[in-house]
Amino acid sequence: MKNKQLNFFSTDSYSKNGFIIIEDILNKEEVLELRNSLLSYFSVNPKEDSLFIDYFLDNNLAQLFFRKKIIDKLKLICGDDLVFINDFNLQYNAFATSGPAKGLHVDCNSEFALKNKYLFHKDYMFAKVGLYLQDNTKEYGGGIDVVPGSHKVWTRFPISILNYFFTRIYLRLYKLNNKKRIKVPIKSGSAVIFDSRLLHGSSKPCNIESNDNNLQFNFENLKFTLYMDVCTTGNEIKFLDNSYKRALAEKSLSSSKDKLFFSRYLSYKFPEDFPDYYRTLVEENKIQVASLDKDRLEALNEDS
């Protein structure tokens, strides 16, 4: 088993398994400082369980994704033409493990349609980057489970329509997929890069019988996870199209600005709406940042 787990740390694990682990992004002191800061925030704001782009930029959390180990590995996997999608999301004690699929899902589910043929191409490169501030343990969770290699289902055949129907059937095999899921051996301060088409879900705490987000943890077991998306040039276009539609939909359904996840991050235009430190990191690392065009940005900000 040890040798199998070690493979999750090698560069080719992304293509073979659909994910790769990068250790020691943050040291113990950095993790402790960040956990204390986040706990202070959520203690004062007990009704919140997520933080988004404004908090990330204002509190310098966004710079964590520019750590050399992450950038170097992303460029090895994806190539040099990286595009950052600033849909920053910090989750606090989030465990979505209920339902027939027991939390298994793919991040591109809202894009899953026959017309979106790009999802079924082998050269499609779109990934989630997660930073974990705790170990992923059997007792308390703390990270993600995955079905290794499940991202390959999307590109099994040379014809998109065959891939679409094959994938649709595969994703409905809840029981079989859950038998194949494994707990990713994440250590505190590590990052995981995974394909947006990979079946994954929260690792469920096994020693606590409780509903999601109503868990009683000691400080060291509290779950803090930071996420954002990254892709190669060109693959951000369809993603932004889809996110823009979701932003318009959520605005029509919610009266609270705090709940408008898509509208909030899409309202930031690069470079003018980003702090100096972020613009500097983008330039130094030769990375592009995805933003809406002027017309859609104006339409989104109307009556905001």
Image (spheres, rainbow, N blue to C red):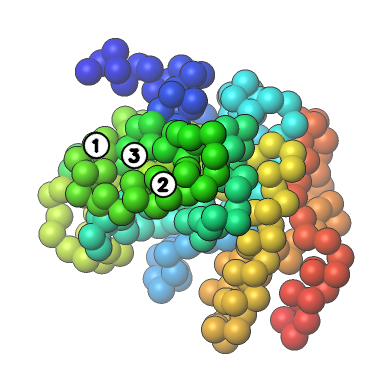
> Percent from the top left, x then y, of residue 290?
75, 50
Which amino acid type is marked by label 1? Lys
Q: Nearer the viewer, residue 87 or 112?
A: 112
Query: At 15% from the left edge and 48% from the top edge, which residue is drawn?
Result: 206
Which amino acid type is marked by label 3? Val
> Percent from the top left, x then y, of residue 79?
68, 25
**Structural crowding at the residue carrying mark 1, measured as other residues with C-alpha within 10 Å and reported as few (<14), some (14–19) or many (≥20):** few
Mark 2 vs 1: CB contact within 8 A: no
Evaluate whether residue 293 shows in this view.
Answer: yes
> Percent from the top left, x then y, of residue 94?
35, 58
**Structural crowding at the residue carrying mark 3, measured as other residues with C-alpha within 10 Å and reported as few (<14), some (14–19) or many (≥20):** many
Query: At 13% from the left edge and 49% from the top edge, which residue is drawn?
Result: 207
| Disc 3 to disc 1, C-alpha distance | 8 Å
| Disc 2 to disc 3, C-alpha distance | 16 Å
Look at the picture and state if 231 lies above or below 253: above
Residue pointed to by mark 3: 146
Q: Which mark is residue 170?
A: none
- Number of marks in the image? 3
Q: Nearer the viewer, mark 2 or mark 1?
A: 2
Query: At 62% from the left edge and 21% from the top edge, which residue is drawn?
Result: 76
> Percent from the top left, x then y, of residue 180?
24, 37
Which amino acid type is marked by label 2? Thr
Element under disc 1? helix
Element under disc 3? strand
In this rendering, position of residue 180 left or right of residue 62: left
Residue pointed to by mark 1: 180
Residue pointed to by mark 2: 167
